[in-house]
Image (cartoon, rainbow, N blue to C red):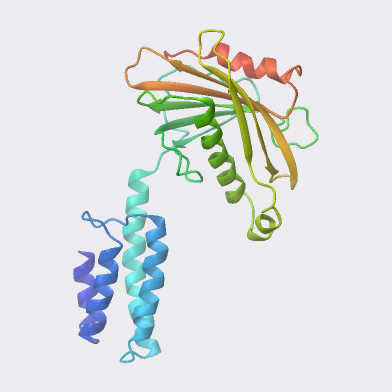
């Protein structure tokens, strides 16, 4: 339908313009008529403007009319796709038990997260933030835990954790920082280091994430514990992360460990 609309708009202008615009739109849409990606959106708009400007048959007023009409169609289609596919973390009902302590924050989103698309797993991330998570003067600063509820049976190793968490925190910094701050922090890369510890019988790991703290603009090292667990639900895996800049002797780790102890595969 969108291509027919473009042709109707073009009936008052050059058919060359109509043809070239249609070709560029088709390149950015899949067979269902939906935008293939947000990157495709940016490319589409850039190409659209270039095509219109290159057509000397159009004056500025005509160009504006075409751009307005095409962008209206594009926005309507993109909005429809986003609304249909949107994940509502507040409304999502977890099929497991992961309690929330008093005053702790909660957030849920899909895995891979939008800021780290290179992570190969699919599922849901379920986060618990300590009350002082975002308060730089608190002993609970940057102390939180999150659960990955994943499809399939991914093999978690120290190497995969290092790769995935490097991508995760690199993306997290980028989406929470402006271009000027990112440029100043280029010399401070995210580094991750993990070792395995399976003595308890459950796959577990300890390690560190060193990065730029986008809230203070200073380097920070997060200590991290990771545990993996398979439950009776076929084709599902749980990976539990605890993080804090505090040493493992600090009391915050008792609160983080309690989250794992209170976790249950069943609702």
Image-quadrant location for residue 266? top left
Residue 22 screen position, x and y as percent: 24, 72
Image-quadrant location for residue 226? top right
Whether residue 242 is visible, yes or no, is yes
Name the quadrant of the C terminus.
top left
Total number of numbered discs in the rendering: 0
Q: Nearer the viewer, residue 170 or 75?
A: 170
Q: Residue at x 35, y 57 (%)?
A: 78
Q: Is residue 173 above or below residue 110?
A: below
View extreme (top): residue: 200
Q: Residue at x 39, y 78 (%)?
A: 50
Query: Is 134 placed left or right of 170 in the picture?
Result: right
Residue 97 screen position, x and y as percent: 48, 16
Q: Is residue 256 above or below residue 76?
A: above
Name the quadrant of the N terminus.
bottom left
Whether residue 130 is visible, yes or no, is no
Residue 5 screen position, x and y as percent: 22, 71
Q: Is residue 11 above or below residue 153?
A: below
Query: Is 82 placed left or right of 187 in the picture?
Result: left
Q: Nearer the viewer, residue 186 or 50?
A: 186
């Amino acid at each position: 339908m969108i291509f027919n609309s473009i042709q109707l708009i073009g009936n008052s202008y050059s058919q060359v313009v109509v043809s070239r615009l249609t070709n560029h739109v088709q390149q950015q849409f899949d067979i269902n008529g939906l935008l293939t990606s947000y990157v495709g959106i940016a490319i589409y708009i850039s190409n659209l403007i270039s095509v219109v400007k290159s057509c000397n048959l159009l004056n500025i007023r005509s160009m504006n009319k075409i751009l307005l009409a095409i962008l209206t169609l594009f926005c309507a289609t993109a909005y429809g796709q986003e609304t249909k596919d949107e994940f509502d973390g507040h409304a999502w009902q977890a099929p497991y038990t992961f309690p929330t302590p008093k005053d702790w924050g909660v957030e849920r989103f899909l895995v891979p997260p939008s800021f780290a698309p290179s992570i190969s797993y699919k599922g849901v991330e379920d986060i618990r933030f300590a009350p002082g998570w975002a308060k730089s003067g608190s002993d609970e600063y940057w102390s939180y835990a999150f659960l990955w509820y994943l499809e399939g049976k991914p093999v978690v190793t120290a190497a995969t954790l290092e790769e995935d968490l490097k991508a995760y925190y690199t993306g997290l910094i980028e989406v929470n920082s402006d271009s000027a701050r990112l440029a100043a922090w280029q010399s401070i890369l995210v580094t991750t280091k993990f070792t395995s510890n399976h003595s308890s019988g459950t796959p577990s790991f300890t390690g560190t994430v060193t990065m730029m703290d986008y809230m203070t603009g200073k380097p920070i090292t997060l200590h991290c514990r990771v545990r993996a667990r398979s439950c009776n639900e076929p084709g599902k895996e749980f990976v539990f992360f605890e993080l804090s800049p505090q040493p493992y002797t600090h009391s915050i780790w008792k609160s983080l460990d309690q989250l794992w102890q209170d976790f249950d595969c069943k609702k």
